[in-house]
Image (cartoon, rainbow, N blue to C red):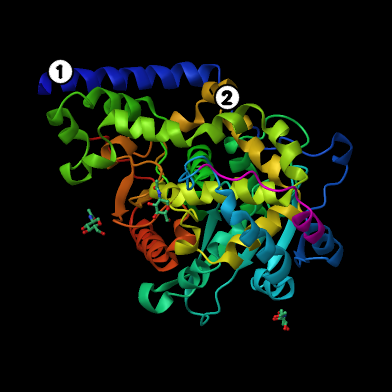
């Protein structure tokens, strides 16, 4: 048995090496100075960093209220369907009325401006970011951390965690400056005007953002697409990234998948790639994959026909609300689909969910946010192979029990040979910083402490 497993692992290693070689031959790695804005904007090489205040303008609010109030009747849900057919329309009036009548735009505008916001031009894009500097005594060392959100998230996910991370120096001995950008086409960052801005290319944009701010080296935290972007950034600029903490395990290294598929037939094989206590997060393979298949239809649609979906949603705040909140519900707990209200109120406040929707709505960012799927999940990107190339950057994995995917250390080491350690949770879901800010912050601080204790150049051997 062990012999067979050994052969399997050996083959998968050979394949991944071969794969990496073939891929790097034909690779179209992202270009450091690719231009994503209008061609005629190239003469504008403004490198200033501008302060920026988010405004919920009256005109936007009036128009939004009008659309919320003037929707056609929602189709009643099927009996006992709860959220299993998607957003249950029995909840729609409550949400729509709350957004139109009770959501306090003035108070929420104050809330979203609680941290300092900036914009700067990078590669033809106007990139929005928060820069949260800790207020600490002068002799406290301050380290920079880039936090990258995903879909359908935003910079707003980190409002509760930010102060817990940035000013914990009495416990950790260091303080943290947070740089939290909006992905291009999300929030207040402008969108590309041409094809090709996928996760690896966004990694380059954010690396250039960090250089612009003056951080030659920095740490990264990422979840969802932010996790893919963080992995790309760590792969493309290993000398600049001092450590990478991720709450969404991603590795497209062939070894990761080969061990997973190779190990499924036998418990003995499984024990070699995952601790027995964690095995139920990976196996039975059919349960895990059927579960993923049932919940990931949106991904295929967004990766192939984002603009069609965009036309419908751009006109309808109820449509935006149902589409985004159903995803938040499902990604937070798979069991939320069996609740009439989608379990949304169990984990988040109505106001904070509506803050996020308001930001998507006012920037008309729905369709531009979907395009990251089309630009990343495609043959060009697979051929470029950035996601399967190993990175020596020290890595820390935070794995919530309800996260969409679990990968064991042995599997992640094919991508992150310098895997330091992990935080395993028996609670929590996909939007962890939003849902459990204390737990999230604690893991980030533990990881940052560990990163500071290792030589970032040291490359560990892959061992199972
Ligand atoms: C909305 O919030 C503002 C600012 O916090 C406050 O002054 C105002 O009274 C609130 N409006 C309502 C209707 O509660
Ligand atoms: C639907 O949700 C209600 C309340 O959230 C729950 O009591 C009921 O069991 C659910 N029905 C199904 C079929 O899951
Ligand atoms: C990894 O983290 C766990 C829990 O945080 C801890 O108990 C363990 O000692 C750590 N392992 C190493 C090698 O640092």
Describe the element under mark 1 as helix, strand or loop: helix
Percent from the top left, x then y, of residue 44? Answer: 86, 46
Dot 2 corresponds to which residue? 378
Count of marks overlaid on the render:
2
Height in image: 139 above or below 397?
below
Q: Is the CB of the residue bearing disc 2 within 8 angstroms of ligand 3? A: no
On the picture, is 116 further left or further right than 439? Answer: right
Height in image: 424 above or below 202?
below
Which stretch is magenta? Answer: 65-78
Q: Earlier in the sequence, mark 1 or mark 2?
A: 1
Residue in view at x 53 percent, y 80 percent: 138
- Image quadrant in which the N terminus is located: top left
Nearer-the-camera pick, 179 or 313:
313
Percent from the top left, x then y, of residue 152? Answer: 58, 48
Percent from the top left, x then y, of residue 65? Answer: 78, 61
Q: Which mark is residue 440?
A: none
Which quadrant of the figure has residue 50?
bottom right
Dot 1 corresponds to which residue? 4
């Amino acid at each position: 048995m062990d012999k067979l497993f050994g052969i399997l692992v050996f083959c998968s290693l050979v394949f991944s090496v071969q794969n990496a070689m073939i891929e790097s031959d034909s690779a179209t790695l992202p270009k450091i100075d690719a231009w994503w804005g209008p061609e005629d904007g190239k003469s504008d090489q403004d490198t200033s960093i501008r302060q920026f205040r988010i405004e919920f303008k009256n005109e936007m609010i009036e128009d939004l209220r009008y659309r919320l109030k003037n929707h056609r009747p929602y189709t009643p849900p099927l009996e006992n369907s709860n959220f299993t057919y998607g957003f249950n329309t029995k909840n729609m009036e409550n949400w729509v009325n709350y957004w139109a009548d009770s959501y306090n735009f003035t108070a929420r505008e104050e809330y979203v401006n609680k941290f300092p916001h900036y914009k700067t031009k990078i590669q033809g894009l106007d990139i929005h970011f928060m820069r949260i500097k800790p207020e600490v005594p002068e002799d406290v060392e301050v380290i920079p951390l880039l936090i990258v959100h995903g879909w359908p998230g935003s910079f707003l996910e980190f409002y509760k965690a930010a102060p817990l991370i940035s000013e914990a120096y009495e416990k950790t001995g260091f303080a943290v400056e947070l740089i939290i950008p909006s992905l291009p086409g999300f929030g207040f960052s402008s969108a590309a005007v041409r094809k090709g801005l996928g996760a690896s290319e966004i990694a380059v944009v954010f690396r250039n953002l960090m250089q612009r701010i003056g951080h030659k080296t920095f740490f990264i935290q990422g979840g969802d697409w932010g996790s893919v972007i963080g992995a790309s950034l760590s792969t493309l600029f290993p000398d600049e990234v001092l450590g990478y903490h991720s709450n969404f395990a991603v590795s497209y290294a062939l070894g990761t998948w080969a061990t997973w598929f190779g190990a499924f037939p036998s418990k003995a094989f499984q024990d070699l790639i995952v601790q027995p206590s964690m095995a139920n997060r990976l196996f039975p393979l059919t349960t895990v994959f059927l579960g993923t298949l049932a919940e990931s239809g949106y991904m295929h649609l967004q990766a192939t026909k984002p603009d069609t979906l965009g036309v419908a949603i751009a006109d309808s705040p109820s449509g935006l609300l149902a589409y985004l909140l159903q995803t938040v519900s499902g990604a937070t707990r798979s069991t939320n689909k069996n609740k009439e209200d989608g379990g949304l109120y169990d984990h988040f406040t109505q106001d904070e969910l509506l803050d996020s929707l308001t930001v998507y709505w006012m920037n008309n960012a729905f369709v531009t946010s979907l395009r990251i799927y089309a630009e990343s999940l495609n043959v060009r990107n697979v051929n470029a192979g950035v996601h399967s190339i190993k990175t020596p950057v020290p890595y820390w994995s935070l794995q919530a029990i309800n996260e969409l995917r679990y990968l064991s250390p042995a599997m992640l080491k094919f991508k992150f040979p310098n895997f330091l350690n992990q935080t395993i949770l028996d609670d929590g879901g996909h939007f962890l910083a939003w849902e459990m800010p204390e737990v999230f912050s604690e893991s980030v601080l533990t990881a940052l402490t560990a990163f500071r204790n290792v030589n970032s150049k040291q490359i560990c051997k892959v061992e199972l």
